[in-house]
Amino acid sequence: MSLLSVRNLTVRLGREADAPAILDNISLDVDPGETVGLVGESGSGKSTLGMSVLRLTPPNLAAGTTGEIFWRGEDILKMPAKSLHKLRGGEISMILQDPMASLNPVFSVGSQLKEALRRAGKPDLAKAAEAALAEVNIPSPAERLRAYPHQMSGGMRQRVVSAIGLAQDPALIICDEPTTALDATIQYQFLDLLRELQRAHHMAMLFVTHDFGVVARICDRVAVMYAGRIVETGPVREIFRNPQHPYTRALLAAVPSTSHALDRLPMIEGAPPSVGARPEGCAFHPRCPLAIDKCRMQPATETLRPGHTVACWRAREEVA
Amino acid sequence: MLRQITGRLIEAFAALLLMSLVIFLLSRVTGDPVALLLSDSATEADRQMLIEQLHLDQPMWRQYLSFVGNALQGDFGQSVNAGRQDALDLVMSRLPASISLAAVALAFTLVVGIAMGVVAAVTRGSWIDVLVRVIALLGQSVPSFWLGIVLIYIVSVKWGLLPTSGYGTWQHYILPALTLGTFTLAAVTRLVRASMLDALGSEYVKLARVKGVSEATVIFKHALSNSLIPVVTFMGAFFATMITGAVVVETVFAWPGIGRLAYESIVSRDFPVIQTVVLVITAMFILANFAVDMLYLAIDPRMRDAG
Amino acid sequence: MQKYSFYAAIGLLILFVLTALVGPYLIEHDPLRGSLRARLDPPFWIEGGSIEHILGTDRLGRDMLARLVQGARISLAVCVVVIGIAGSIGTAIGTFSGYVGGWVDRLLMRIVDLALSLPVILLALLIGAISGPSFANIVIVISLVLWSQYARMSRGEALRVKNEDYVALARTSGLGHGMIIFRHILPNIAPSLIVVATLQVGVVIVLEASLSFLGVGVPPPNPSWGSMVADGRGLVVTAWWISLFPGIAILLVVMAVNIVGDALTDRINPALRGRTA
């Protein structure tokens, strides 16, 4: 059984049925111990998906959420507040994008870490906190516990955020572009650390990114998102070897230059559509070099090989 | 940190010196200082004595030095009114009433303002939020001298619930403190609401929620602690508003503080007392700003390490 | 809801300005001269009142409505002059300071800090006590209180804009300093300045009224709304209308200004929201 299983998740900007959808009919599975990459440009809805899993979307989005998100078979969207509370941090945790902003500036690093450790019921908080910092390779952890966030570098803070994320031994950790704000050299260091931690804790990981270079380094499977829909999913090797959707190909073509984080892909003409102005049919067709008339209608999601699905009218032709 | 404190102390001293210079120049350059500082009933001998005392026959810088020298010894001259009281003694005797009123008003303002700001931010968009914003808008717009008169008329005269004016029991504090605090209350409410909304939308609050801590901890620990920093930054400004307001409010409620003393001495053109009041209030003001700076250093860890 | 209150506020402000500009010509009563026969007449809907004096008369038998209208004119005049003076001096100093930078900037900003750390309202009392109430005094005094806000704001904006690419480009292409300030920096500062100026209208009106209430503002017999409230203070029990109406006038105008100011803040410079205490 999948650990996390998203079924037909739609998130609209408000309760009305015709409100613009940030996420449109998303289905996705994460198995225990597996790392799934969620790739797309900014505005594709990938971060919203992460927040929806913890039911931490703003009220107007929460009101416009339909579908199911199963956690070990139980629907998170219908969970009572108490179980939800246990789920957050305890079973599913999250590493946020911006290490500069995600630690509270007025409390010491130690006190913020201990908040999470206390919930995990660790007997000796001070010792557990020290061990947690040591695990994320922070030198002289005992002293660092007393430090405030502004006294640390970005890379160091992101490790603290990871330590907080791991504090309650979650079964799934959602990483929302955790390396975007970091320098290029530190990015890969941090990714290797995450990989190590994941093995040590036997966690599953949902890795939100816009960078296929990162995907190649850390993920087992990948789901490519465009304008609120998943356009292609598959094992990382398969997708790299045999990308089907023109959008996936464009993203892959951009990889060599990804030693620098980039938010807009220079290989693809134009910008992704905003939430309110998504084109009919395949949302990518105005930017797609292979677009045909048919693309004005929404293509169905087809399975090409086991585990490899794509939503594109022209995919079959290309294979043939 | 020590460097910052010394820096602030030097600034505070410079501000006080500047104010003394302004007062000095105002009294010497505009018009006739002798006429300003002596009562109408003064004799020629009094005149000569004053000229000698203040070195009015000597160059300006010499006069200023003796003005500052006298001030440092607590000699601000005498009231020109009957009784010829020592100006500093007079001001000091009125100080406790003013400080106690300002303290009550400030406490009321902070407690109610922070509570309203937090409630409004947490219930953003609800009728409670709208109500709080209307109250804040009214409080920000109503002139305090008029509010005082209206309150006296309704609460004291019509309903007979509280004393109309004067000083003595705790009941005497209610209306003046309410009037004095209204503007600041509105300011605190708006400030706390705005910064709470910022904090509630911040990444660190998101992380706290992701950690799974309770909603109460999220609001009162993570969000509120950050929202109080701007309140502390503005404390100096709030205190200034209270001092300014005190002149008006003490006048309306016949409160025996230095605000009313300032008003009375202006009406009776008692310049020695006015200049003393202004200097004493400036000193308090600067002291309060200094205290706020120190408080700010104490609560915001980022400030402690800043240059 | 918010939209309606905004339009209502705009309407009220237009009414205020129109009243100040043309109101005095529409009212036959002289705001400065009363008739002893008509002393303390109540508003027309109270027994003893008459249509002759719609809002009643004051202690000296002067028509309340005529005085209120004249008071609007005084309030508006003080606002325009003060904000003009404080705004241009403060903006000039702030822009210059931010643009020049270096020790000049540090020195000027120290002075701004000092100006902010002095209880200038007491200086107003002092000046009033020495030279007596006058229109010039009140303008000078309120300008002294307010200029530093413009200096702070425009300095920050000038610092920011100075380093933008297009200004660097203008400089390398040989544009003079004066031209850069007028063509590139001031237009960028303008929106923020408009927000500050709007929010200050309320501050100016209340300050002027407070000083006039204390007797060091607009000199009698000119009817400032503040001095009118003071006139009626001793008579609230018997002639409440004297203090009530000018107070309501201040409340309404200041409230309208604050609503408009908040809306502009949201539109133009959201970072300032709630932070203009």
Image (spheres, grey):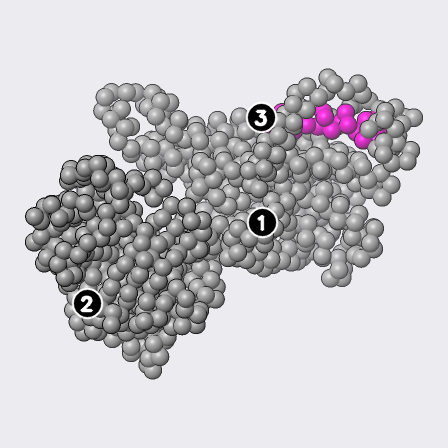
- Image mark 2: chain: A
Kindly report the distance in space between the C-alpha atoms of the residues bearing marks 2 and 3.
68 Å
Q: Position of residue B289 (x, y in %)?
A: 51, 51
Q: Which residue is mark 1?
A: B130
**Neighbour class for label 3 at 10 Å: few (<14), some, many (≥20)?**
some
Write down the chain letter for disc 1: B
Query: Among all residues in the image, which is located at the extreme bottom?
Result: A123
Q: Is residue C70 magenta?
A: yes
**Is C15 one of the magenta-colored residues?**
no
Q: Position of residue C147 (x, y in %)?
A: 51, 33
Front-lying residue, A280 or B253: A280
**Looking at numbered disc 2 in the image, what kind of residue is underneath it?**
Glu
Q: Is residue A193 left or right of residue A8?
A: left
Q: Which amino acid, mark 1?
A: Val
Q: Quadrant of residue B143?
A: top right
Residue A226, given in percent of the width and then of the height, sits at 25, 47
Pick the residue in front: C151 or B284. Answer: C151
**Picture coordinates of residue C47, whole percent (x, y):** 90, 35
Residue at image point 71% right, 52% down: B176
* Residue to which mark 3 is pinned: C80
**Quick check: marks 1 and 3 in contact, CB under 8 Å?**
no
Element type at mark 2: loop
Q: Residue at x 9, y 52 (%)?
A: A242
Which region is colored magenta? C55-79
Q: Which residue is mark 2?
A: A34
Label 1, label 2: how many angstroms apart (C-alpha)?
48 Å
